[in-house]
Amino acid sequence: MAIEIAQATGKREREGSPWTGLWAVVAKEMADHLTSARMRVLEILIVLTAAGTIYGAMQNIRSTIGQDRFLFLKLFTTAQEPLPAFVGFMGLLVPLIAIALVFDTINGEFSRRTLSRILAQPIYRDALLLGKFLGALFTLALVFTAIWLLIMGLGLWGLGVPPSSEEVARSFLFLLVTIFYGGIWLALAMTFSIIFRQPATAALASLAVWLFFMVFWDIIAGVLAQTLMPIRFGFSEEYLKQAQLELGLTRLSPTTLYAEAILALLQPSIRSLGFILPTQLQGAILGSPLPLSQSLLLIWPHLTGLLAATLLLFALGYTLFQRQEIRA
């Protein structure tokens, strides 16, 4: 990698911008990811998953053609035994794919002893780290976009009806939220790749964090809510405050933020992601879905949280990488 990056940026002066060589690193990282055997295996897994879940969903919703306004959105949310819905698979696959892409992105350079040669070229640490992150993020976005187009194409072929503009917009926003969600795990795995010199240790640490939020955090949030806000007198207000605290704690998990965001996008009938007030039930009783603008307002805090978590993790990794000593 050091030789190819040096050829792309060797004629630039060292005194230039700290982002000198950024796009050369991005292009090289994307080329490495897209041509690696690891990526081929992941792509086959995603395609088989998408094809299986969409085929099962189409079997269930063909009978409702002409009766439902959002048939294409049901392609993402409808399940058929024994397969879950497509969004359920994505909640599991996105972190695994993101971790698999970058768990060895920095410590692998240390292991191959190529990092010092890369930084000896007119490339700053800023450009190298950001280029590796953007290369993995663009690769992730390219793969998910291809899967999204595949699903839309299968829907057109299987259902025989075109999607409405709102369905296209909602499904495209689902794609963007999925990419943001993957960015969190990219930043986390890259940070562990900086902290640990062994790629296996970085991969295990990233998977441990994912399992913690996927399996254990909801249990811990329930216990913390009962401890911090105990029920003393049995009043309804006490139960409400405890439930609100538990809900707030569970939303510290990126998996919860992602699940609630895509739920509001792909199911327009969802009018609240928390406790439902009587005023929110008026439109639901009449069967009217929320417009796209209102659904976006509903999930705006979730999108902000996903983006903020990505930036914070990347900033942590950036700080640690700048302080590391790199020797030839």
Image: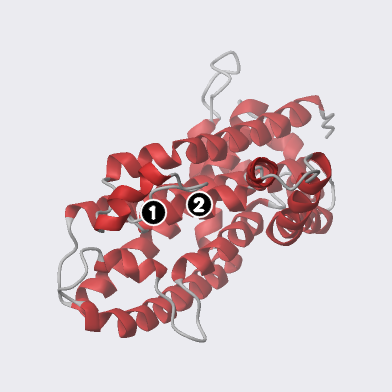
- CA–CA distance between discs 1 and 2? 10 Å
Q: Which residue is mark 1?
A: 270
Tag 1 and tag 2, C-beta contact below 8 Å: no
- Residue in the foreground of this view, choosing between 12 and 305: 305
Count of marks, rendered view: 2
- Within 10 angstroms of label 1, few (less than 14), some, or many (20 or more) residues? some
- Residue in the foreground of this view, choosing between 77 and 1: 77
Task: Indicate the position of residue 71 as horizontal and vertical percent values.
Answer: 25, 69
Labelled disc at residue 260? 2
Labelled disc at residue 296? none
* Mark 1 / mark 2, whichever is N-terminal: 2
Residue type at mark 2?
A: Glu
Q: Quadrant of residue 63?
A: bottom left
Residue 62: tell me if it is visible. yes
Task: Indicate the position of residue 70 as horizontal and vertical percent values.
Answer: 25, 63
Q: Residue at left 59%, top 41%?
A: 132
- Residue in the foreground of this view, choosing between 160 and 194: 160
Q: Residue at left 71%, top 52%?
A: 103
* Residue extending farthest top: 15
Task: Indicate the position of residue 100 as horizontal and vertical percent values.
Answer: 65, 59
Task: Identify the image's colour scheme: rainbow, by chain, secondary structure or one colour.
Answer: secondary structure
User: Taking 318 as reference, is 16 above or below it?
Assistant: above
Residue 25: tell me if it is visible. no
Residue type at mark 1?
A: Ile
The quarter of the image holding the C terminus is: top right
Secondary structure state at the residue bearing disc 1: loop
- In this rendering, which labeled residue sits more in front, label 1 or label 2? 1
Q: Residue at left 27%, top 66%?
A: 72
Q: Residue at left 71%, top 54%?
A: 213
- Within 10 angstroms of label 2, few (less than 14), some, or many (20 or more) residues? some
Q: Quadrant of residue 60?
A: bottom left
